[in-house]
Image: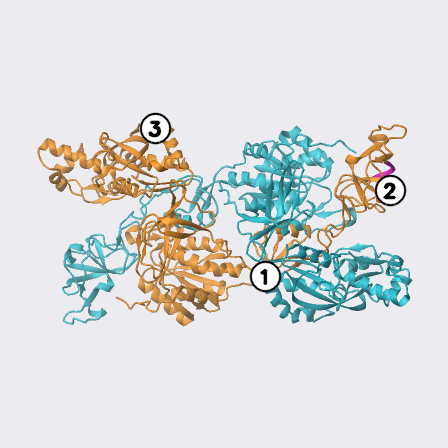
Chain colours: A cyan, B orange
Amino acid sequence: MSDRREFRDLAEPEEAHEAIASLDLAPEPETVPLREARGRVLAERIDAELDVPGFDRASMDGYAVRARDTFGADEVDPATLDLVGAVHAGSEPAVAVEPGTCAEISTGAVMPDGADAVVMVERTTEVAPGDESGDDAGVDAVEIRTSVAPGDHVMFAGADIAAGGRALGPGTEITPREIGLLSALGVDAVPVRGTPTVGIVSTGDELVRPGGDLHSERGQIYDVNSYTIAAGVEEAGGEARLYPHAGDDYDEMERLLVEASEECDLVLSSGSTSASAVDVIYRVIEERGDLLLHGVSVKPGKPMLVGRVGESAYVGLPGYPVSALTIFRTFVAPAVRRAAGKPEPQTATASGRMAQQERYSEGRMRLMPAGLVEDSDGNTLVYPVDKGSGATTSLVEADGVVVVDPDTEYLAAGESVEVQLFSPDVRAPTLFAVGEDDPALSRLLDRVERPRYLPIGSRQGLRRLRDGVPDAAVVAGEPGRDPVASPDPTGDDEPVPTEVLGEWTREWGLIVPAGNPDDVTGLADLVDRDLRFVNRDSNAGVRTTLANALADVADERGTTRRELTEAIDGFDRAVRAHESPARRVLAGDADAGLGLRATAERLDTGFVSLGSEAVRVHANPARADKSGVRQLREAIADGDDVFATLAGYGR
Amino acid sequence: MSDRREFRDLAEPEEAHEAIASLDLAPEPETVPLREARGRVLAERIDAELDVPGFDRASMDGYAVRARDTFGADEVDPATLDLVGAVHAGSEPAVAVEPGTCAEISTGAVMPDGADAVVMVERTTEVAPGDESGDDAGVDAVEIRTSVAPGDHVMFAGADIAAGGRALGPGTEITPREIGLLSALGVDAVPVRGTPTVGIVSTGDELVRPGGDLHSERGQIYDVNSYTIAAGVEEAGGEARLYPHAGDDYDEMERLLVEASEECDLVLSSGSTSASAVDVIYRVIEERGDLLLHGVSVKPGKPMLVGRVGESAYVGLPGYPVSALTIFRTFVAPAVRRAAGKPEPQTATASGRMAQQERYSEGRMRLMPAGLVEDSDGNTLVYPVDKGSGATTSLVEADGVVVVDPDTEYLAAGESVEVQLFSPDVRAPTLFAVGEDDPALSRLLDRVERPRYLPIGSRQGLRRLRDGVPDAAVVAGEPGRDPVASPDPTGDDEPVPTEVLGEWTREWGLIVPAGNPDDVTGLADLVDRDLRFVNRDSNAGVRTTLANALADVADERGTTRRELTEAIDGFDRAVRAHESPARRVLAGDADAGLGLRATAERLDTGFVSLGSEAVRVHANPARADKSGVRQLREAIADGDDVFATLAGYGR
């Protein structure tokens, strides 16, 4: 093996924050058009350069008067003023209001010379000559039925904000409201903090950009970190630039990091997870920059680097997506926001109780991804989401992180914890269900608002439902053999009390190549012939159904089920998802696989039917009224269209 | 006057919500590149089309083995396996692991045929032939010092998510985390909800786009609503399109509204505030569309229209910016979010107590703009911000709105209220100060984080400080005549107990045209000669200083101050802001104005010095430790650079 960098002297998280804060990522201020200024941050104070309004302005429809002429006027004893003309908004007054006269005026119009108040139209009556009830055509005077004081219903020039006044301070984030004030001031070019440019270099020979051709046989995987971190950079107010992937070659890595450093305020690498790539980056930073810190005492994310490349700041993120995004959010995003002048978002947190105990004793701070579920009392339960850093699904299966102190070895079930939500808008899902992987269920979930479903299989699903965490479990099993009320498939003793939200049936059997070239007819062929089989994992309900069917064959033959399963080539070759056996068959890796008719139709394979099994959705009875649980119940009840479109499905 | 639409039958706010909800604004779904998908909302479910990972993957650096070969191995009795080669991430294994052999493997690499587990490198020792301590060059075997089970440190194909599995449901908002999962699935074209297009037609002959030339004498004002509402539309997830302003002409209004309706999902007009324009819009909607509702029982915002133009939805907003934005936020933004598929943001609210009583009795729901200030105990005080709907500064002087029920006639001081914040990130300012309009203060405030300053004058400022709402008041007055401890300029009896945060002096006098063409030498010229003067308003401290100086002149002449002020042409011609008299002089509207030497220098006018006055910053002593108050105290103490750059300023 090559030499390895052991991250022995791990820095405390606080030191990592300080190291990053010591780097300067802030770009020069710039000027943007007002129309594009939303979300930016003012680089300097804006003073008003003109009065708003720019003239004495009528703030009511009515008549511009000299207030003195109305003194004493009321309903009983109105003042009558000669009408000398009209002033409309957007035009220069062509009249002046002399003593004893008035002018019609619209809201927003310029007060004519001489006038110092407006009488609202509702308190006036037009008068035609010789006709007290007059109409528009002949009006030459107006009765004023109220008295007004100078300034009434007039907004004086500069009353909103006057020229020279402080309008907005530096550091103000520009929202629609600030755009309103800037518009009123006529400011159409806004001096704002620059957007920090963040270059992203993902390293690893195995990476392929999404959309490219993937060669799994060569160990290629799609590059998750480039787009994920880019989105995180943009969310924090930065501009992300993606660079081509770098392999483990020193010269290539150096060229890319130096190129990025010349173009960006901050360079991020997400390390290949192989030790040799980390070594290469390490050497490049030491030779072309300055390494301030390597290794942070935090899980996930230990192998984090902080330093400089050329004139730019540099942070090396771990390679695993969950680790990379967690470290980015925790350490880098605050620095990007600071550089962009953006305030730290109000930390959104949720308080809850641990749904289960969690042991931890690694002696470094842990950022534990956690999911939320509301119990029947509306309290929040918190459960750890730990599928390993390599699992990208855990990105969306968690709602936030619980910061676990290095000295905490143990979180007890029921212990209060605080979850730092991924964003202030994160809410617990309306439905948290687990269990069998079923295509009809997947479609039904589309009709539930914000559901969360973990396809962990019928057996595990029931176990979790028993433990009180999820709202519901989806269980597949042989019809008539209720896996819940009767012999408990979990192997535990007590039956789980549940409320059945609904059920349906699905046809199961053997997936074979199109045209069934081996003429498979049933389970006996798997036992008796030389066929390569692919099974589902032991949590899958359909595997229990298969086991039960094999037990029936064993009974017929007067042998044991074990003897039959041992005779099947591949009975223990188990895959986790409902389509996986079919895909193995399609790939030519197997002659038959356990699966559903619906899957065979979807993937155009052959199918040998072995029967129908029931799929039941069991809810925690205490949570039967949660909105998502109700929505799922309704979706099943109204789901005929779903069952009709899936081959082999029924009620 | 023209006929007026009286909004007599006002709809309840709930009816307005329903009317808007009955309109369909949702555009067709579209497909966007993954790189641009952040913030969008999935239009349909995304299932995995491939296994992630796509192959059985080593999750540690170490040696790929057949687990069976390690059974029983431990530190004392290691198993020795022949090394047959190496597999690196991103390359296809060139070796197979036969019984008794192992292969070096990197994290992320494809498991070679035959191997079913990985032994981590830390539990192994390389062995060279005939050299137990061997080095890389000659290694041909490896000692395995632990036993592993099949699957240890291997992530099986599809273990993260398997082909056919449900990845993300419809309606999911795409954050960096979803981008991570979509990247892992290789999805680079994402089906998302369309962005509703919202056309904005501002009406009013008087409007000029920001950046254009403004003719105030014709009553022109900058168009505030177009950009403000456009920013609001974008914040809600829509795309805004601005149309040219429409005047009150029927044909022009019809042409614009119909054009916008053909291009947009929703058309918004912001009505000119003149009654005739409202009438014209009203007629266009009735003739070219369908009017569902006119007039809503809410303040501000009564004159709101809801209907259709052609095939598009239509909402008519009021013309005043505060009303327009309030109505947009309350009624329209939720519909735009719904159309975009965006969740309603968590309503951010702040609970507080009314800082003062507020009467209200108009019988319609009031959306009362409110400001927040923290008192010395960290409790939130809430005060109404009511500068009239025509004031754009009230957009930024408020932090949210208090919804006041139509039946509430009175909010008592101390009463608990809930403020709906303009956004979840709104926080009370760190400093809420009021008082004299002073250019040095404005610069000092740049050094305070999130301050709020209302330039309401020294007199009003002291009054408010006495009422307990602001943290500090800035008071200008004649040196030696302490406006606070000694004769109270507010006219109230009790002196206000305050803590002085700092003070400075500024030179005041008469602003005259450049070169002082009238040879003004002092106050006597104003009294004795035929000069047009512009004064400041009675809240301005500098006006008090002027009054005191005139009292001294009166003493010298053996007359009363009143006689002198009556002799000055324009002593009562008062303007509110510190630069305004100078600007009147510059415009030729006056021969002399009350002002500061600093203003004269800035605007290149002449100046006749009449003395220096003190400016003191008085804090509410209970709040002297608030962070913004401390920052202002420090800014004043460290403010020599500010005072040095402003002519006539000193300590």
Magenta region's main secondary structure? strand
Q: Residue A482 location in percent, x, y?
A: 73, 65
Residues tagged by mark 3 and mark 2 found on one chain of the structure? yes
Q: Is residue A545 above or below residue A186?
A: below
Q: Nearer the viewer, mark 1 or mark 3?
A: 1
Q: Which residue is mark 2?
A: B69
Tell me the amino acid under the disc marked 3. Ala
Mark pair 1, 3: CA separation: 66 Å
Q: Residues within 10 Å of mark 3 (few under 14, many from 20)?
A: few
Q: Nearer the viewer, residue A578 or B525?
A: A578
Q: Which mark is residue A497?
A: none
Which image quarter is the N terminus of chain B in?
A: bottom left
Residue under numbered circle 1: A628
Does residue B349 show up magenta in the picture? no
Quick one: SS at disc 1?
helix
Q: Tag 3's secondary structure?
A: helix
Q: Amino acid at mark 1?
A: Gly
Q: Residues within 10 Å of mark 2 (few under 14, many from 20)?
A: many
Asked whether residue A493 is in view, the answer is yes
Please state which of residues A650 and B390 is positioned toward the viewer in this rendering: A650
The answer to whether residue B605 shows anywhere in this view is no
Determine which residue is flagged by label 3: B644
Residue located at (40% from left, 44% from top): B379
Residue A639 at what x, y percent from top left?
A: 64, 69
Quadrant containing the C terminus of chain B in the rendered view:
top left
Find the magenta span and give its range.
Answer: B79-85
